[in-house]
Amino acid sequence: MEETIVCDTNIIIEVFKKNHEALSLIEKIGKGNISISAVTLMELYFGALNKKELERIKKSLSGLTILSIHESTTSIALNLIESFSKSHGLTIPDALIASTAIDNKLPLLTYNTKDFKFIKNLQLVSF
C-alpha cells in the first residue's frame, strides 16, 4: 500500500496493545503513509494512565502526520452531526475524525466500520 491513510483511534490502540493484525497492517501501509486526526491524538493523550504512559504515547506517535481541525473540517463535522447524531448515534469525536478524513480526501482505517458506514462521502478501509 502506498496511499496515505487516516487511522482511527481504535487502530492505534490495537497497535499499542501489540495486536499482530494491526501491527502487520501498519507495517504494510508504512508509518510514513499514516496520519491521524488531532482528535485521535487528544483521545490517546486523555486515555493515558499516567505521565510515563503519556510520554510513551507521544514518542510512539512522533513520526505520524497529525491532521489539524480546520474551519472546513468543523463545517463538515457539524453537517455530519446534524445528519447522523440522532439517527445513527454519531459522536462528536467520530464526526471530527470522519470529517478530517473527508476534508483531506483520505480514506479512514477503522475497526468500527459500523460507526461510519452511513457517511456516504467517507472512504472506509477495514480489516
Image (cartoon, rainbow, N blue to C red):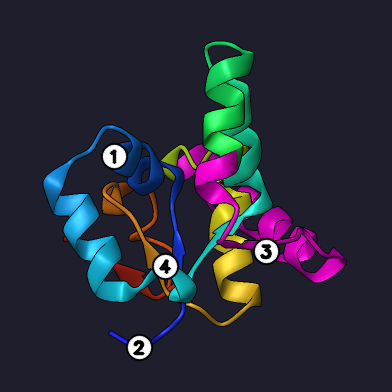
Question: From the viewer's perspective, is the residue at label 4 or at label 3 nearer?
Answer: 4
In the rendered structure, find residue 14 and report the number of the disc placed on it: 1
Q: Do the residues bearing badges 2 and 4 touch, measured as CB atoms within 8 Å?
A: no
Residue 88, given in percent of the width and then of the height, sits at: 42, 43
Amino acid type, residue under disc 2 in the picture: Glu
The chief SS type of the magenta part is helix
- Disc 2 target residue: 2
Q: Is residue 126 visible?
A: no
| Magenta segment | 59-87
Label 1 environment density (alpha carbons within 10 Å; few <14, some 14–19, many ≥20): some
Quarter of the image where one finds residue 83 = bottom right
Which residue occupies 16% across, 60% down?
Answer: 127
Whether residue 73 is in magenta: the answer is yes
- Disc 3 target residue: 67
Which of disc 1 and disc 3 is earlier in sequence? 1
- Disc 4 target residue: 31
Query: Marks 3 and 1, Cα distance to the nearest angstrom?
Result: 20 Å
Amino acid type, residue under disc 4 in the picture: Lys
Label 3 environment density (alpha carbons within 10 Å; few <14, some 14–19, many ≥20): some
| Residue, far top | 50
Residue 97, given in percent of the width and then of the height, sits at: 57, 54
